[in-house]
Structure formats: C-alpha cells, structure tokens
Image: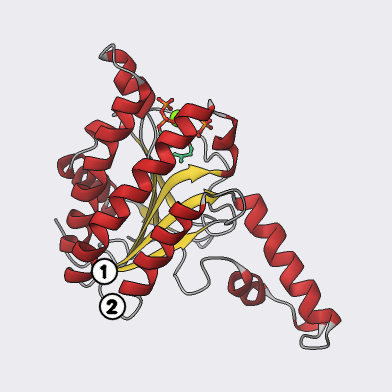
C-alpha cells in the first residue's frame, strides 16, 4: 500500500448489521454486537495506516423510527462500549469527537460521550469522529441558524458570508472534508450523511455487511481510492 496517498479523512456508513444477523437466523441485536467488533478493528487499522480522521456513522436522526427495543439496545451498547473503550483510545493517543444533536439522547449515553471527549481532547493522534443522532440536513439547519444569529448581532456582514463561513458553522469545523466515503452492505445512497462535506469525496460501495468488513476489506477500499483520479472539475488529474 502506498503510504503517501492515504486519505486524510475517511467517512464510513456502517450498514448491514441487521441483514448480516438475519442471514444467520439471529436477532438484529446480534448483528449490532458483531458490528462493534469491526469498529475496534477498523479504528486500529486506520490509525496504523496514517489516516488523520475517521468519521463513523453510528446512529442517524432517522434511526429513531426503529422499534423502541432496538433503539434502546443501540443506546446501551454504545454507552457500555464507550466507557470501556475511552481508556484504550486515550492510550492510543486518539482524540474522540462526537457530531450530532443531543436532544433525545438518554443522559447515560450523553455522559459517556462527554467523558470520552473530555478524556481524549488533548490527544493529537487520529481523530475518531462518531456521528451519533446525526443528520446532515439538521446540521445545515443548525449552521444557518448560527450564521443568521451572528449576522443579526452584527458579528458578521452578510456580504462576507462565503464557503468557509458555512464550513466553520458545521459540526465538523475542525476537520478536513472526507476524501473517501465507504458504505457497506450494498446500498448506494448517503442517507443524510455529511451532505456538504462530501462534495468532492470518492465513493466506495461494497456488498460486505458491516460485521464482515475486516481490516482486509478496509485495505481494499484504500487501494481502490489510491487508483482514482481526482480532478475537482479541472482537466488535469490529481491522484489520491
Ligand atoms: C447499521 O446496520 C447500524 C445502524 C444503522 C445503527 P442496520 O441496522 O441498518 O442493518 P440493516 O441495514 O437493517 O441490515
Ligand atoms: C444509515 O443507515 C445510518 C447508519 C449507518 C447509522 P440506515 O440503515 O439507517 O439507512 P437507510 O435507512 O438504509 O437509508
Ligand atoms: Mg441499514
């Protein structure tokens, strides 16, 4: 693998836990529990490869539509794993961040997210960015509200609003835009994920379900990315 052309920021839609479990005649919760194992593996692999930021889509604003029992299972799984993992992330020098709205998220989960962020905020290794109760349209609405309120207070002139103003008002303000978006399990849609930030990302879709997305599969995605020509609208090509 070419160490030079490793994407700086990789975003992943971790999809297919339910289908993976169903194929094994197991409940959806079994799929989610097996998905957690892959998170550990991919975080470690990304850091070893030299990825600077990894954003994982764990729970969308729309996932509240699922049965109550599944939602609460997902919340509990996150809280218990985070408490266990925070120390480990800190030991690895990883900075943990969360993006999304806090409304509706149980206190127990908010506390775990807050603790993990506090514990690791001084680290300068890879950033692990967890999209939780996240929706890109909601994020854009929040950004518009912030910009409008700054303009109303006279902190910002309307003519001065540019792309950077918008980027800086998003939850991802301190991260570069993703170079690569991976979605597992065969769906070819972005499901309200990072709409602004993915403008020029390369997309990689695989039929593997998230619980079977191993380090080897991740390396395949990176290799594929390294073969892409990124043109950004220009005629000359720029690789990686
Ligand atoms: C991804 O797997 C995990 C979450 C969205 C929380 P799914 O639960 O969406 O699995 P499928 O897509 O139903 O197979
Ligand atoms: C997207 O997956 C959200 C996460 C992976 C957390 P979904 O399974 O919720 O997306 P749809 O419903 O197939 O679009
Ligand atoms: Mg799904």
Q: Which mark is residue 56?
A: none
Q: Which residue is mark 1?
A: 94
| Contact between labelled residues 2 and 1, with CB atoms less than 8 Å apart | yes
- In depth, the one of 81 and 183 nearer the eye is 81
Q: Residues within 10 Å of mark 1 (few under 14, many from 20)?
A: many
Q: Quadrant of residue 129?
A: bottom left
Total of numbered circles in the picture?
A: 2
* Image vertical order of residue 61 relative to residue 226, above or below: above
* Image vertical order of residue 184 relative to residue 50, above or below: above
Which element type, helix, strand or loop, lies under badge 2?
Answer: loop
Q: Residue furthest bottom?
A: 155
Q: Position of residue 34 (x, y in %)?
A: 24, 33
- Quick check: which quadrant has ligand 3? top left
Q: Is residue 189 left or right of residue 50?
A: right
Q: Position of residue 162 (x, y in %)?
A: 69, 76
* Image vertical order of residue 84 relative to residue 161, above or below: above
Query: Which residue shows up at 21% across the image and 49% down it?
Result: 40
Which element type, helix, strand or loop, lies under badge 1?
Answer: loop
Disc 1/disc 2 C-alpha distance (Å):
6 Å
Q: Which residue is mark 2?
A: 123
The disc, 1 or 2, on the residue closer to the chain's N-terminal end is: 1
């Amino acid at each position: 693998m070419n160490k030079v052309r490793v994407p700086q920021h990789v975003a992943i839609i971790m999809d297919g836990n339910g289908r993976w479990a169903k194929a094994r005649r197991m409940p959806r919760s079994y799929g989610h529990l097996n998905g957690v194992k892959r998170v550990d593996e991919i975080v470690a692999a990304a850091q070893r490869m030299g990825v600077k930021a990894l954003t994982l889509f764990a729970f969308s604003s729309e996932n509240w539509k699922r049965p109550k029992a599944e939602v609460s299972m997902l919340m509990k799984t996150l809280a218990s794993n985070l408490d266990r993992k925070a120390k480990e992330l800190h030991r690895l020098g990883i900075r943990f961040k969360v993006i999304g709205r806090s409304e509706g998220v149980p206190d127990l989960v908010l506390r775990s997210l807050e603790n993990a962020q506090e514990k690791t905020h001084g680290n300068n290794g890879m950033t692990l960015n967890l999209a939780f109760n996240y929706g890109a349209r909601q994020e854009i609405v929040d950004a518009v509200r912030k910009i409008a309120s700054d303009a109303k207070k006279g902190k910002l002139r309307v003519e001065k609003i540019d792309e950077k103003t918008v980027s800086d008002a998003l939850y991802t303000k301190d991260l570069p835009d993703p170079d690569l978006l991976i979605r597992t399990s065969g769906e070819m849609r972005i499901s309200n994920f990072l709409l602004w930030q993915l403008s020029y990302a390369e997309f990689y879709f695989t039929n593997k379900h998230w619980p079977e997305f191993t380090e080897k599969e991740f390396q395949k995605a990176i290799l594929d990315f390294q073969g892409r020509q990124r043109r950004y609208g220009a005629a000359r090509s720029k690789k990686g």
